[in-house]
Image (tube, rainbow, N blue to C red):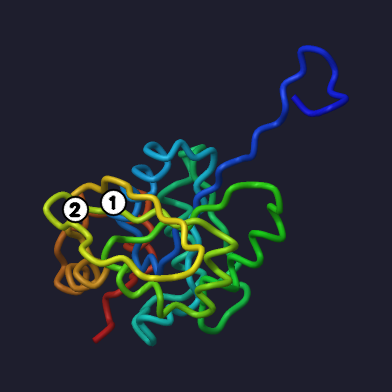
Amino acid sequence: MPAGAPPNSVAALDVKIGFLGGSFDPIHFGHLLAAQDAYEQHKLDRLVIVPASQSPMKPGDMQSTAADRLAMVRAATEWDTRIEVSDVELRRGGVSYTIDSARHFRAVYPKDDLYWVIGGDQLPQLHLWKDIEELAKLVEFIFLERPGYPVRATPVVPGLRLHRCDGHLLAISSTELRDRTRRHLSLDYFVPHKAIVYIREKGLYRDQR
């Protein structure tokens, strides 16, 4: 108990906030399972999904607008009180570097514990991320390891704080889902229903080549 605290008072605990970034073009159950796995296994208090304006790893890969991707994420998660959605990268525009968002969220939540959730396949390239040493000071990393696909290499970055998370084996890609839409195949069992409805109503991915 802090000095001077009233009798029987309980010191406030730091809030644990996780962040999951990505293009989400479209969002699918693989993304949402990753969010839930990190939330549950690391006992997070909040999980924030952060759609990117433009991924530095996949330039030019996105086919729907920022507004459409944000709407799909919100439609897919609006019922879940554990999950929040941030449009900070979409409003900023340009290439979305994690360091910029980490600086933003650290300023907003100066006393909380911040965790960036990534796939295990991203871990070996983590040392190449922009300003990674500063990033390692601002956030901790939760990496998802799928059964049968152990992460065999970890980056050497001063001060890097890594936390392993058991991820589910769910091989879904947004690229595959866009192709299914073009071929008039069902997105059921891949994408949350409300996001599917949005895709149909807006005619997304139909005319892309």
- Give the residue drawn at x 31%, y 65%: 154
Q: Position of residue 110 (x, y in %)?
A: 71, 53
- Give the residue drawn at x 37%, y 43%: 36
Front-lying residue, 77 or 2: 2
Q: Position of residue 113 (x, y in %)?
A: 59, 48
Secondary structure of residue under mark 1? helix
The image shows residue 106, relative to residue 208, as above or below, that is above
The image shows residue 81, relative to residue 64, as above or below, that is above
Query: In the visual, does 119 lie left or right of 78?
Result: left
Residue at the spot of label 1? 29
Query: In the visual, does 122 lie left or right of 88?
Result: left
- Give the residue drawn at x 71%, y 31%: 12
Are the two marked residues, 1 and 2, in contact with CB atoms closer than 8 angstroms?
A: yes
Query: In the visual, does 132 lie left or right of 119?
Result: right
Q: Position of residue 1 (x, y in %)?
A: 74, 24
Q: Label 2 neighbourhood size at 10 Å, few (<14), some (14-19), many (20+)?
A: some
Which of pointers 1 and 2 indicates the residue nearer the eye?
2
Query: In the visual, does 23 lie left or right of 152?
Result: right
Front-lying residue, 130 or 176: 130
Residue type highlighted by circle 1: Phe
| First in residue order: circle 1 vs circle 2 | 1
| Separation (CA) of disc 1 from disc 2 | 8 Å
Residue at the limit of the structure toward the left, as seen here: 148
Residue at the spot of label 2? 170
The image shows residue 95, relative to residue 49, as above or below, that is below
Residue type highlighted by circle 2: Leu
Secondary structure of residue under mark 2? loop
